[in-house]
Amino acid sequence: MLTYQIALSFFGIAVLLALAPGPDNLFVLMQAALWGRESGMIVVLGLCAGLVAHTAAVAVGLAAVFAASVTAFTVLKLAGAAYLVYLAWGAFTARATTAEGTRPPRLSRGALFRRGIVMNLTNPKVSLFFLAFLPQFTSPARGSVALQTLSLGGLFMLATLLVFGCIAFFSGAFGEMMQGSQRAQRLLNRVAGVVFVGLAVKLALASR
């Protein structure tokens, strides 16, 4: 099992990594700004659910497949890029509040949760990162490596929930203040579209 010192040091590193600008926290920032704090938090939960799959993949060795197979890596990253382009299109074509004060309905909680999961699972770089990062904190001398890996994944998810939750809270508050202005809403949608396109290009060009 993990020692207290290892768990604490790993958690500290995980928090710092979650704070570093990247596709996932940018994704949370834009989703919360567009749809509000609650929606942002649901997306965060979806991203954390995706981390469960990545952790399990490392624990059972599936992540090594993406490290060894160029085809598997390419297919997954292109699927993720296509999904981001789809989100960008949705942001570019979204309508602002009309003169009567009506606005297109927010996405359902289930749709937002799935959006977070898909965003996380279609990024093969996360699996490769976990494959390289988690084993550095495990040792056969401390028992089951698989259980240690799952424990580390749980700590990483906790750090992600903490940091991304704060991003969703403050970004959502800012986005909700902007909802009273049609011009601000249109600007926010355009910015979100550009961010999603940028993330799509970055993912499509990513190499192992």
Image (cartoon, rainbow, N blue to C red):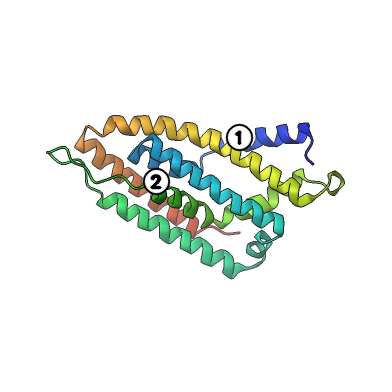
Q: Give the structural element (helix, strand or loop) at label 1.
A: helix
Q: State which quadrant residue 17 falls in.
A: top right
Q: Is residue 131 above or below residue 178?
A: below
Residue shown at 51%/61% (left/top)?
77
x, y percentage for residue 18? Answer: 56, 38
Q: Residue furthest bottom?
A: 71
Query: Would you say 125 lies left or right of 88 here?
Result: right
* 13 left or right, relative to 4: left
Residue 168 in view: yes
Q: Check disc 2 and report the residue beneath it.
A: 109
Residue 164 position within the rendered picture, expressed as x and y whole percent measured from the top left: 50, 37
Indicate whether 147 appears above or below 178. Answer: below
Q: Nearer the viewer, mark 1 or mark 2?
A: 2
| Residue 26: mark in rendering | none
Callout 1 environment at 10 Å: few (<14), some (14 to 19), or many (20+)? many
Coordinates of residue 11 in the picture (x, y in percent): 67, 35
Q: 155 and 186: which one is in front?
A: 155
Q: Is residue 29 visible?
A: no
Callout 2: few (<14), some (14-19), or many (20+) C-alpha neighbours within 10 Å? some
Q: Residue at x 63, y 63 (%)?
A: 66
Secondary element type, mark 2: helix
In the rendered structure, the answer to whether residue 150 lies left or right of residue 197 reads right
Q: Which residue is mark 1?
A: 15
Q: Earlier in the sequence, mark 1 or mark 2?
A: 1
Determine the residue positioned at 25% across, 49% down: 94
In the rendered view of the protein, which quadrant contains the C terminus? Answer: bottom right
Name the amino acid, label 1.
Val
Residue 36 falls in image quadrant: top left
Q: Quadrant of residue 177?
A: top left
Residue situated furthest right in the rendering = 141
Q: Residue at x 21, y 37 (%)?
A: 183
